[in-house]
Image: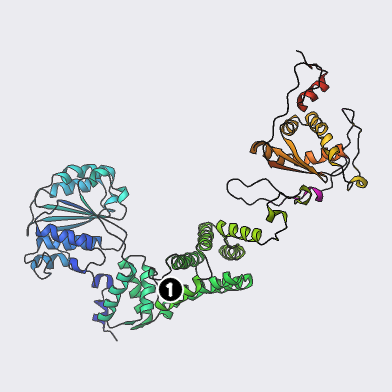
Amino acid sequence: MKTADESKNYIVTARKWRPQVTGDVVGQEHVTTTLRNAIATNRLSHAYLFSGPRGVGKTTTARILAKAINCLHPRDNEPDNSCELCAELAEGRSLNVFEIDGASNRGVDEIRNLRDSVRYPPAKGKYKVYIIDEVHMLTKEAFNALLKTLEEPPPFVVFIFATTEIHKVPATILSRCQRFDFRRISVREITDRLRFIAGREKIRIDDEALLIVAKRADGSMRDAQSIFDQLVSFCGASISSDKIISMLSIVDDEIYFRVTDILRKRDPAAALLLIDEIVNRGVDAREFLLGLIEHLRNLLITVTMKSTDLLETADHYRVRYKDTADAFSDSDLLRLIRIVSAAELELRRSQHPRFKLELCLLQMIALDRTVQIETLIEEIERLRNSRPAGSPSASGARPAASAAPQNASAPVRGSVKATQPVLHPDQIVPPPVQYTGTHDAPAHSFTPETAGTPIPSDILQQKWPILVAEACKRRIAVGSILSESRPVDISGNQIRIACPDGFHLDSFKRNKQFILDLAESIYGAKVRIEGILGTFPSAPSPEPSAPSAAPANPVIRAIMDEFGAKEIN
């Protein structure tokens, strides 16, 4: 048991194991190497700006640099940490190094006081060093007051600024400083450092537990060391991954593998039971979705790279990822990640997290598997080649119109898009449409008794101009579309209409039901009309010598009949 003195002198890991030389700074070699070389070649700048996320060593590096340039007995451009000036800085009583909190000293008055003190040389050592932490918190006026001093300070003054929000620092300040961007510390570097600290502290911790702590720290060494202290307080001198999961309410990777098994088996009942288990364990819903995104990302990397070398996980889980990746394609995983990401965004403003989780998993289960267009084309070719040799498709002959499916469509152009299901015309029973008859044609009334009566092809061809004329009377736009199209195949109560372009074809499809109803009233029986894209010869113009002949265009003929107009030569 610790004595009162030992407990009183306890120092947290982040302070106790703070690096004292640049060689101990983890993950920032690009910064520390440059600073050592600058000291060695006597190319020290008058102002430095350290930017980067929290807990990656910005302030620590600033303190080491301040000690290195003032140390009485430096070794390899590093402070010896034993001379008088190094001891004063370590104990916080140095008269040469001033640490200023930019959040609480952000006004112009504080900067004016700093500017006045800069004029006096250091009491000891070579340089006066001003470390301003969170410099982005200074006001605009404070930055302006600092500009001139920052640009031309006395030769014995060095400014070191640190910030986590570099975008808030004015460009006038950036241009007067040497900027160093600190990066996030990798998971491997954090685990190596924690393993070293645990060995010195005589604490047993397994590799999986170290990996969980490092991933939880999100690139911050200080956060990792804080979690490490918390684990030591909870577990004592022996730390295992099971205890970490229990203490931090972390979702075990095994849960995420259960999720992918449920998706593979398409088992919604198991999904609901899994959500119930997660909620009862008190796991944060958003944290679960973030972990699921990472899990799917690991599967995507495994599928894409055919390897698990890029995964930050334990070795026994790498084998699981290889086995699970065989059940998913990269397209499926991308779609699943999009669903989970959208659910995570919606969860931030939702009052029902459990419902969002259930809906997310059920939506993922119901998702159809992705099929590449190349696969579909190959399957179509295979089916086409497997037909009997005597079939019309195999022989290259055009199939008869009567054998064509009722829902046949025009040739596909552009990308293929899913459409809403549409009832076939023969599945809809329209109300009777009365036709009074025009152009010496008898009137017919559609009745169920005549619905199945076959119509000769010559009658279908003969009454087509009558149908066009009647369409012009009722809907001039539809009549114009029909007049500019041609019946190219008439057989067995089916008329195949060739439209000159996509515009006419789209308009035909939008008004197809109206055309079907009108055709039934004209022909006295149900007729199937299909629109396709096609070309056809233009209709012959009337002879100039016969001015009394009826015009060939049904639209003009309908207008002449309606208004009693006559053609004038």
The answer to whether residue 252 is visible is no
Q: Quadrant of the C terminus?
A: top right
Q: Nearer the viewer, residue 209 or 470?
A: 470
Query: Magenta region's main secondary structure?
Result: loop
Viewer can see residue 491: yes
Residue occupying image coordinates x 26% and y 42%? 141
Q: Is residue 567 left or right of residue 181?
A: right
Left or right: 265 in relation to 169: right
Q: Is residue 255 above or below residue 53?
A: below
Q: Vertical placement of 236 versus 421: above or below?
A: below
**Residue at image mark 1:** 248
Q: Is residue 379 above or below residue 550?
A: below
Seen in the image, is 6 located left or right of residue 67? right
Residue at 42 percent of width and 79 percent of height:
316
| Residue 345 rendering spot, x and y as whole percentages | 51, 57
Q: Amino acid at mark 1?
A: Leu
| Residue 433 colored in magenta in the image | yes
> Around disc 1, counting alpha carbons within 10 Å, would you say few (fewer than 14), some (14 to 19), or many (20 or more)?
some
Residue 212 falls in image quadrant = bottom left
Q: Residue furthest top?
A: 569
Across and down, in percent, residue 99 comes to 20, 58
Closer to us: 481 or 163: 481
Q: Is residue 99 magenta?
A: no
Residue 439 is left or right of residue 237, and the answer is: right
Q: Nearer the viewer, residue 317 or 97?
A: 317
The magenta stretch is 414-439
Q: Residue furthest right?
A: 449
Q: Position of residue 237 (x, y in %)?
A: 33, 83
- Secondary structure state at the residue bearing disc 1: helix
The one nearer the camera, 411 or 183, is 411
